[in-house]
C-alpha cells in the first residue's frame, strides 16, 4: 500500500452519503417514504418537487414532522401522527433497504474509482451522514460489496448525535473517533446543509452537486463540480480551480486540501 504524499498533512477522506456517494433522494428515500405512507394507509404522496422542499430538513423522522407542521392544514393531520412517526420511519427504512438490495441505486460517477485510489494511497476513510446507519451499510453492500463496510473506520450516521446537519456535530464526532484534527481531513458533500456542517467542523469541502442542490450556496467550498467524473467522462467545474484536472483524483484532492491550509 502506498502512503499519502509525505509533504501532505492530509490523512483522511470523510464522505457524506445521500447525494454525494449516490443519488439516493429522489428515486430512493422519496419512494420509500411514499411506500411507508401507503403501507400505513396514510394518504400522503411526496412528489419530486415537494420532496425538494422537504430536503430543507435533514433526517427522515425530522422531515416527516416538518411536513406535518408546514405542509398540512390542521384538519388533514392524522390523529396521533407524532407518536406514529418512529414506526413509520422504521417502515420507510425497510422499504429503502429493500430497494437498495435490488441494485436500483448505483454510486455516482467516479465514486468507486476515487475510493479505490484513496485506499491504495493509504488514506483513512470515514462517513458522516444524517441517514440511518443501516441505510449506509445497505448502500455499501449492494454497490461496493459487503467487505467495503470495513474500509470505513468510522460510519457516523443518524441519531448517533442529537443535532443533525447543518449542525457540525456529526463531522466532529467522526473526527473525534478517528483522533484527527480537521486540518488532516477533507469532506465530500452535495448540499448546503452538508457544507454548513462540514465547514462548521472546519473541514475543507469538495462539492459535487445534484439536481436538488445545484442552486445551493457553496461559496466557501474548495471546489464545486457537477460530479467526480471519470478519465473518459470528466467533470464540469461549476466554481473553483481544478488545476488542469478533468476528473477528481487523489492528486486534485491533495492540491485542494493544501490550498485550503493556505487560505
Ligand atoms: C440525508 C438526509 C437523510 C435522508 C433520509 O442528508 O437528510 O435524512 O434523506 O434518511 P445528508 P433517513 O446527505 O446531508 O446526510 O430517513 O434515514 O433519516
Ligand atoms: Mg448529502
Image (tube, rainbow, N blue to C red):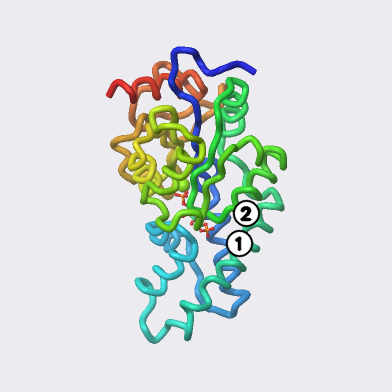
x, y percentage for residue 25? Answer: 51, 53
Q: State which quarter of the image contains the N terminus.
A: top right
Q: Secondary structure at mark 2?
A: helix
Look at mark 2 in the image and give the residue it sits on.
134
From this view, report whether residue 250 is shown above or below residue 104: above
Look at mark 1 in the image and give the residue it sits on.
93
- 206 sits left or right of 149 in the view: left
From this view, report whether residue 251 is shown above or below residue 203: above
Tell me the residue at 62%/27% (across/down): 116
From this view, report whether residue 6 is shown above or below residue 74: above
Disc 2 residue crowd, few under 14, some 14–19, many 20+, Cα 10 Å: some
x, y percentage for residue 102? Answer: 71, 52
The yes-or-no answer for disc 1 within 8 Å of ligand 1 is yes
Q: How far, Cα to Cα, is label 1 from label 2? A: 8 Å
Q: State which quarter of the image contains the C terminus.
A: top left
Disc 1 residue crowd, few under 14, some 14–19, many 20+, Cα 10 Å: many
Amino acid at each position: 500500500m502506498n502512503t499519502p504524499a509525505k509533504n501532505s498533512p492530509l490523512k483522511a477522506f470523510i464522505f457524506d452519503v445521500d447525494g454525494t456517494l449516490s443519488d439516493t433522494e429522489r428515486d430512493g428515500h422519496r419512494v420509500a417514504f411514499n411506500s411507508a405512507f401507503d403501507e400505513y394507509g396514510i394518504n400522503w404522496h411526496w412528489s419530486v418537487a415537494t420532496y425538494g422542499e422537504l430536503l430543507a430538513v435533514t433526517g427522515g423522522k425530522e422531515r416527516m414532522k416538518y411536513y406535518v407542521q408546514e405542509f398540512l392544514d390542521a384538519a388533514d393531520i392524522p390523529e396521533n401522527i407524532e407518536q406514529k412517526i418512529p414506526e413509520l420511519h422504521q417502515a420507510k427504512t425497510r422499504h429503502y433497504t429493500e430497494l437498495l438490495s435490488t441494485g436500483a441505486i448505483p454510486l455516482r460517477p467516479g465514486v468507486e474509482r476515487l475510493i479505490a485510489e484513496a485506499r491504495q494511497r493509504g488514506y483513512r476513510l470515514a462517513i458522516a451522514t444524517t441517514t440511518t446507519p443501516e441505510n449506509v451499510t445497505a448502500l455499501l453492500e449492494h454497490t461496493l460489496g459487503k467487505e467495503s463496510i470495513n474500509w470505513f473506520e468510522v460510519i457516523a450516521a443518524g441519531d448517533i448525535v442529537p443535532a443533525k446537519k447543518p449542525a457540525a456535530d456529526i463531522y466532529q464526532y467522526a473526527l473525534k473517533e478517528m483522533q484527527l484534527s480537521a486540518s488532516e481531513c477533507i469532506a465530500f458533500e452535495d448540499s448546503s446543509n452538508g457544507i454548513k456542517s462540514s465547514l462548521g467542523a472546519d473541514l475543507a469541502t469538495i462539492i459535487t452537486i445534484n439536481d436538488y442542490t445545484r442552486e445551493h450556496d457553496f461559496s466557501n467550498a474548495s471546489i464545486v463540480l457537477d460530479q467526480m467524473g471519470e478519465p473518459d467522462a470528466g467533470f464540469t467545474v461549476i466554481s473553483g480551480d481544478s488545476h488542469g484536472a478533468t476528473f477528481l483524483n487523489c492528486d486534485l484532492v491533495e492540491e485542494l486540501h493544501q490550498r485550503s491550509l493556505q487560505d
